[in-house]
Amino acid sequence: MIALAPGPLWQQWSEANLNNFKRMENEAPKVYTRMMAAVKKALGAKPEKAPAKKAAKAQKAQPELKDDPEQYLKWLEERCKAEQNNSTTDYFEFAKSQGAIIAAGFPPDQAAANDIIKKHAPQ
């Protein structure tokens, strides 16, 4: 945890290091972001919410195999990996729910989708 000097001492320290902060923000933005979050926390500020970009990514709609085979197969791979952490019943229910979507695909794409499901199936 970062220990900060109270009141005016913090202000002097931050002003003396302003150029270093600007350089860090430009050259190492991830480090800068984490450091500033730690400083804000140490000063008693409430943590900021996660960026909207991550929320939008999490809400990505399921692509259809017949419309975009590459995107569907990529999505299916990610979901199967995530479903592996659930129970065997949950995994097979998920795989079953994908059956109609896979059946609507072109035969080589169907085979690729079924291979993904088999590859990640619980043993």
Image (cartoon, grey):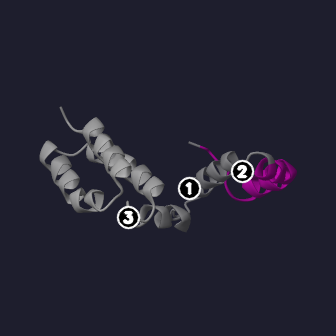
SS for callout 1: helix
Q: Which residue is mark 2?
A: 29
Residue farthest toward the left in the current orientation of the protein:
89
- Mark 1 or 3: in front is 3
In the picture, the disc for residue 16 is none
Seen in the image, is 26 located left or right of residue 55?
Answer: right
Q: What's the magenta bit mostly, secondary-structure-wise?
A: helix
Residue displayed at 23% across by 62% down:
100
Seen in the image, is 5 located left or right of residue 54?
Answer: right
Q: Are marks 1 and 3 in contact (CB under 8 Å)?
A: no
Q: Is residue 47 visible?
A: no
Q: Residues within 10 Å of mark 2 (few under 14, many from 20)?
A: few
Residue displayed at 29% across by 62% down:
104
- Mark 2 or 1: in front is 2
Q: Tell me if residue 48 is in the magenta stretch.
A: no
SS for callout 3: loop
Q: Amino acid at mark 1?
A: Lys
In the image, residue 107 lies at what x, y percent? Answer: 33, 51
In the image, residue 69 lies at what x, y percent? Answer: 43, 56
**Front residue of this view, candidates 64 and 89:** 64
Query: On the rendered image, what quadrant is the N terminus found in?
Result: top right
Q: Could you say which quadrant of the image residue 65 lies in?
A: bottom left
SS for callout 2: helix
Q: Which residue is mark 3?
A: 64
Work out how far the residue at label 2 is from the one at label 1, CA to CA, in angstroms: 18 Å
Query: On the rendered image, what quadrant is the C terminus found in?
Result: top left
Work out how far the residue at label 2 is from the one at label 3, CA to CA, in angstroms: 37 Å
Q: Earlier in the sequence, mark 2 or mark 3?
A: 2
* Number of residue marks: 3
